[in-house]
Amino acid sequence: MSKFSFSRLNSTKDTGFGDNFSGRFINKDGYPNIKKKGINILNRYSWYHTMLNLKRWQFIGLLIGSYIVVNFIFALIYYSIGIEHLTGIDKSNFQNEFTDVFFFSSQTFTTVGYGRIAPVGFLASLVATFEAFLGLLAFAIATGLFYGRFSRPRAFLQFSDVALISPHKDKTGLMFRMAPFKNTSLTDASITVLTSFEVTENGQTKSSFYNLKLEVTKITSLILNWTIVHYIDEESPFYGLNADDLKNTDIEIIVHVKAFDSIFSSDVVQRTSYTSDEIIYGAKFEKMYAPDETNRFTVLNLDLINSNFPAPLPNIS
Amino acid sequence: MSKFSFSRLNSTKDTGFGDNFSGRFINKDGYPNIKKKGINILNRYSWYHTMLNLKRWQFIGLLIGSYIVVNFIFALIYYSIGIEHLTGIDKSNFQNEFTDVFFFSSQTFTTVGYGRIAPVGFLASLVATFEAFLGLLAFAIATGLFYGRFSRPRAFLQFSDVALISPHKDKTGLMFRMAPFKNTSLTDASITVLTSFEVTENGQTKSSFYNLKLEVTKITSLILNWTIVHYIDEESPFYGLNADDLKNTDIEIIVHVKAFDSIFSSDVVQRTSYTSDEIIYGAKFEKMYAPDETNRFTVLNLDLINSNFPAPLPNIS
Amino acid sequence: MSKFSFSRLNSTKDTGFGDNFSGRFINKDGYPNIKKKGINILNRYSWYHTMLNLKRWQFIGLLIGSYIVVNFIFALIYYSIGIEHLTGIDKSNFQNEFTDVFFFSSQTFTTVGYGRIAPVGFLASLVATFEAFLGLLAFAIATGLFYGRFSRPRAFLQFSDVALISPHKDKTGLMFRMAPFKNTSLTDASITVLTSFEVTENGQTKSSFYNLKLEVTKITSLILNWTIVHYIDEESPFYGLNADDLKNTDIEIIVHVKAFDSIFSSDVVQRTSYTSDEIIYGAKFEKMYAPDETNRFTVLNLDLINSNFPAPLPNIS
Amino acid sequence: MSKFSFSRLNSTKDTGFGDNFSGRFINKDGYPNIKKKGINILNRYSWYHTMLNLKRWQFIGLLIGSYIVVNFIFALIYYSIGIEHLTGIDKSNFQNEFTDVFFFSSQTFTTVGYGRIAPVGFLASLVATFEAFLGLLAFAIATGLFYGRFSRPRAFLQFSDVALISPHKDKTGLMFRMAPFKNTSLTDASITVLTSFEVTENGQTKSSFYNLKLEVTKITSLILNWTIVHYIDEESPFYGLNADDLKNTDIEIIVHVKAFDSIFSSDVVQRTSYTSDEIIYGAKFEKMYAPDETNRFTVLNLDLINSNFPAPLPNIS
């Protein structure tokens, strides 16, 4: 859909994105916009990756739900074996019976084992033995999952929702910014920015990819906000595009940040992307940090990450 | 067995494979085709590596089996100490006695400890104390093994079963492909491909190794399939080989892929290999991905990983 | 406040520190001297990073405190449900009742479950079931936190409290030193040193950053002390500064060390900084290591890390 | 003590070893030959590194020993509180009393809690509550230590006990070799070799360090044995040394190997060293691997790692 020729630029071939990809390449949250089919669905998912990506309430909910279901199933098994094989059951009515059987099951699964209710005879004992074993393995797995979830190295970077095209040091720059929003300690941060343009040549629509040249690609400490600047000069694929062109061209800016978290002692990676409608033409970011009153600290205000004000650019016809 | 002279090419010496290796170098699953002997067999195995490489059902089976065996051994110990040192045993017959002793053992090992049966006196108490301790350590180890198994960084790449020799962009290319088949997130993937040719010189059979020059050796995102292309030109060891030569020469293509998994925040590595009989002469891969109906996603069909169709090549005499 | 012009030097732009930062950039303990505000405070902290950074007594105190609070809350719940739903309670007076209820709660939370006191009926059993489950998850999390805390790769480097400006090999050098103070095994250590100078130009106070050129920036084994030497020659930002200038200029030396710990098999990073008042003009470090009496070992005396003696420098007017 | 002048060679300064080190630099097991003193001894040890370096039997012994000691201490506490605060104690004589108290303690610490003996009253309950809590934390720590111990990435390389000076491809080479002796999967192995010579100049004995130039410094797969070859030519510090010189000179060859373990997905490092008396002049290694009978596998015989036979070298006067 673009009126522009990029023949002056070398596109890059090593993106790993196909040239007839549909829709966004990378979603706002950094995950690729792709679906898979074929092979068995169970083989298509790494359950561990899935568990790590669940939201906290989903994970907790899953644990509690599984606990209830497993207890219920074992309660049914004990009940069908016969409550006479459990000592101490209150047999006054069915409801009391099942309550006691159900909670006997949970007391076994958690290995709390008060003993007010206890199994007698081979079958009930066998099931209880297996349930206690299963309970311990389940909590072993839960231990691993908890650790996996909270020790998972993540960058905890907040990106600005929009990218701006701003006047900057007598030039025009494409900018966006990020800030570490948690009490992490990131060093040796580096960034690569890839842009895709959907161009129509000979009636065929294809995506071309260009690596954007940046003012600074590495910083030694990522502790304040980091504003990424790409100068729009003749070597830029954005050269000559005005506000309307931007809206009418199918553009995606794909951002890939890598840093070393010195608490995790591990590299962390975060990705995001900006599409045409997330680029503001003619605006500048407000400063996000300032000395505090005592002049002994610097304060980074994370609420300002998106704050920008209009800043007119020279007209491009 | 080859009629070819590779004197025009520089073989590589730094493969780590010996030059009179027998059989395949790398198995299809990526593990080297080697056996070790000498030193004590217990020192020759890392039990942790072994536990990580067990199949899931083998691992679960091993846990359950050990649980039964340990309980049985402790039951024998309690029985030989004398059942009079356990309270609450049903002494009506031997079978009931042993049932109670066995399940007392399991209730101790899992620390469920209902207390219907409990040890009395020094010896039985001592064994029970030791069993409970052992049980906790066993589940501590199981916890570690579960975590080690499911947090183990793996690439989860599916390789095509075959490599193809195909016409490609007016040239001839050796190709194979791979696709990430799980919900992983791989970035910065790189590949090296080594080929071994068994050549007979002066009546002696030796393997020579050549690094294959590839069209693209690094991609920034490995989210779709990745087709690896080696052009068969004058600098290629495959130059001049026809279909029959391929079948009659002892060739192995050794593939080594490395990528960064941004969920594990770790490098992952996967290897595979193709031997002469896994190379198809004159065929092309079908496309594996396509836009979905809504045109908002791209769908990767993993079932097509091996799909190829005949594509004739110019004759080589 | 400096009388010096640094126009002969290239300052570095890729530090990640803003140019109107207030106070120290990096604190003595290596953490950046920054505060954050904005967004929800809960989102601003990674609770895992926080747990890893707690001092040992704080962490233990938090565990014990949580244990008491949780037991107390559950005791209140059981009490409000009614003590008639717990068997074996000593009902002689309120204090005994609450003692039994409180310890029943703790016996449930730890899954010790003696059974002298046990829940009867639906509601008490339900709460007990939930408490045992919560207890197991809490200890699962504690397990992960313990492991996370003690397996966290750290460099365990002790830096000298001061940096010295010393005569060294006929030149003048800025020096500080570090030593690994624990039984770690560090290899492939590298260092980068950045210096900030607060300079006033045209009435505006700004920080400029300069990378310091070092005599040695990498060593293969970090087992003894490592003395870092920056020669103060014409290319040094310290060139021409005398003792008074040092005191009156706002300088910060920011140190960043990276090494490979071969026991953790992980890179470890440590940072520190020296401000103007932590630089001694005209002093030399004493040697920290010596052969032991048997001449078969080398002994590193960590108490000498700061030992230095006066060493006059040529006068700079 | 050497008659040789090394003035033709550039020694290396970035070893991290001091120049008046006493005795061996690196012990045979790869740990530096150094002792530390000063600062508090508790601060001088990382207890986690210590736990990871304990031999298996030491670690198990420590666990069992701690378990007994802790139980004994708590038994004393319960006994001093008074056995009337524990139900179910056999009060027939002191020995039975203490037995019951001791095992009550262990049943609490392991949370097995049969309940035959249970605490009554505030003080005994409080101690039991604390012991169960401590028990769970202890096993949480044990879980972490077990995992830390067996998941610790190690190279599992066996080095030859000796280095040889051998005739090799018409030249003279210094050689030693290594082999991975467990079922690991090492790729991308690299090696650096440093040599120290103790030379006496102007009556002062000092160590000089030289990096040895190697035939191959990187291999892609470390699955067979790897023989490291340094050619002794004019650029070698060994040039011109004969068998007697070797014995009479204080030489140490310091070896540092790094590889990627694709099961741990982690870099692993191993070091060793050879001193003058571990170098054999005029010998060659026997081959360690051979095809098996079926000709489908290669068999690596680890028992041959040190096998060598005499191989005379041209005389050096």
Image (spheres, coloured by chain):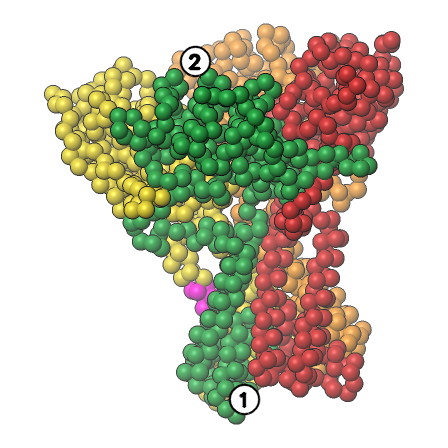
Chain colours: A orange, B red, C yellow, D green
- Give the class, few, some or many, for how many residues have Cα within 10 Å of label 1's Cα (few <14, many ≥20): some
User: Magenta segment: does it hold A312?
Assistant: no
- Tell me the residue at 27%/46% (across/down): C303
Q: Can residue D111 be seen by looking at this rendering?
A: yes
Q: Quadrant of the C terminus of chain C?
A: top left
- Give the class, few, some or many, for how many residues have Cα within 10 Å of label 2's Cα (few <14, many ≥20): few
* Chain under numbered label 2: A
- Tell me the residue at 46%/17% (across/down): D234
Question: What residue range appears in magenta?
Answer: C64-69
Q: Position of residue B251 (x, y in %)?
A: 78, 23
Amino acid type at image mark 1 = Asp
- Tell me the residue at 63%/57% (across/down): B142
* Chain under numbered label 1: D
Position of D120 compared to B287: left or right?
A: left
Disc 1 and disc 2 in contact, CB within 8 angstroms: no
Point out which mark residue A171 bears: 2
Q: Position of residue D169 (x, y in %)?
A: 60, 20
Q: Is residue B126 above or below residue D88?
A: above
Depth check: B102 or B185 in front? B102
Depth check: D54 or D195 in front? D195
Indicate the secondary structure of the residue bearing disc 2: strand
Q: Position of residue D280 (x, y in %)?
A: 52, 33
Amino acid type at image mark 2 = Lys
Determine which quarter of the picture holds residue A311: top left
Q: Which residue is mark 1?
A: D90
Q: Is residue D121 above or below residue C266?
A: below
